Image (cartoon, rainbow, N blue to C red):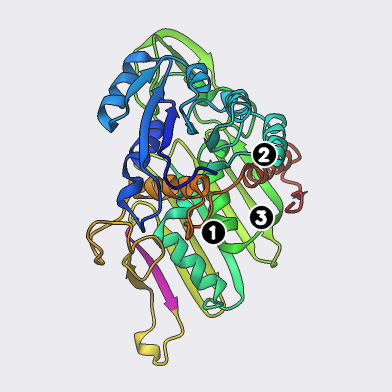
Amino acid sequence: MTTSGKPLSVAVIGAGMAGRSHAAGYRNVNTVFGAGLPPVRLAAIADANVALGEDAARRYGFEKALPSWEAVVEDPTIDAVSIVVGNALHRPIAEALVAAGKHVLCEKPLAGSLEDARAMAELERSAEVVTAVGYTFRRSPGIAGIRDHVQRGELGDLTLFSGRYWCDYATDPRGPLSWRFKGDAGSGALGDVGSHVIDAAEYVAGPIVSVSGAVLSTQIAKRPLPLGAVVGHNAAPVSDEFGEVENEDTASFTATFASGLVGTFSVTRTGFGLPNGLAFDILGVGGRAAFDQHRPAEYLFDDAQPDARTRGARQIIVGPNLPYFAGGVPMEAPGVGASNGDNFTYQARAFLDQVAGVAEPLPACATFADALRTMEIIQAVVASARNDGAAVAVPPVA
């Protein structure tokens, strides 16, 4: 761990939309919560697209842009690094960073294949540095508040979890054939957005033990090849030549939790008009709650009010009574809002709390082992789809 008096030097590998979110998070970590975190040095942003990296470094106050991830590994002054690039690159970069003694926060999904994910989880067991995974929705005050309701038994025995992540970033058939559309079944919408809603489900309602009824489908089978670099989900110039989409645009399945709770899930990247639609409902015999990322500063809650006339879903506005909000925003008052950007700040702070050994840290980030489990669930969903929806057991929690 880093001593409290020594500055923490951080870098981000990847300057796309998620990389910029990590960069902004690091810039803000010492503006939130209590004292105790050392000064943070914003050392470098690395990207093979040098102009993109330079622009991100300028925007977020990092000292320099580097042309490769190897340059970050080789810099002995850098302590902690976010990996925010294509999934297939996660393993080699993480292995090199850990070998160099650097702490690692890796974006989800953990890796491009289950084999690589298992290797990374094994690496974590012997690593002498902090290794973590970016499940930012764990930092949402609304989702964390619903989790508290569940853990206090305020919904009674749970009966149904219905989760979805519906996005529209792949609805345009002229959208370029980027790396997101390459890879085996499970690496498309399931790996990209499904990993978030699966993790949120287990975070709120406990472990999943089996899946069934899975269906995977691809709505746009071919896409034009890009003429240059593709940044995030953005449009880009394309050629007249097309290539095959290799993974799924849409997936649905059911799940059984260890508690006996039943879950239904659907994910898509071709859902028109839904920019970032992670949402879920969780029902019990004594109450219910619902969250929608399109309205991130609130959630709905309903329970058995003494007078039946006043029963019904109530809008709970995010405020200081919920996790992360108190000390996490400049104006600590209900109604001032919350955003995905705040979640990245809280995540970066939690990661650096772990690195620095802060006395009263935020709850720790998800681990490589946690993210391997999500990928094992995704592979169980793929196996169910390949076997006409048959039930497939999920490996138990390690």
Distance between the alpha carbons at the discs numbered 2 and 3 = 28 Å
* Left or right of 255 in this view: 366: left
Residue at screen point 32% across, 28% down:
62
Distance between the alpha carbons at the discs numbered 1 and 3 = 10 Å
Q: Visible in this render: residue 16? A: no
* Left or right of 69 in this view: 16: left
Which element is circle 3 on?
Answer: strand
Q: Quadrant of residue 60?
A: top left
Mark 3, residue position: 255
Residue nearer the viewer, 387 or 235? 235
Residue nearer the viewer, 112 or 6? 6
Q: Which residues are magenta?
A: 297-302
Residue type (three-letter) at the residue carrying disc 3 = Ala
Mark 1, residue position: 162
Which element is circle 2 on?
Answer: helix
Q: Nearer the viewer, mark 2 or mark 3?
A: 2
Mark 2, residue position: 124
Q: Earlier in the sequence, mark 1 or mark 2?
A: 2
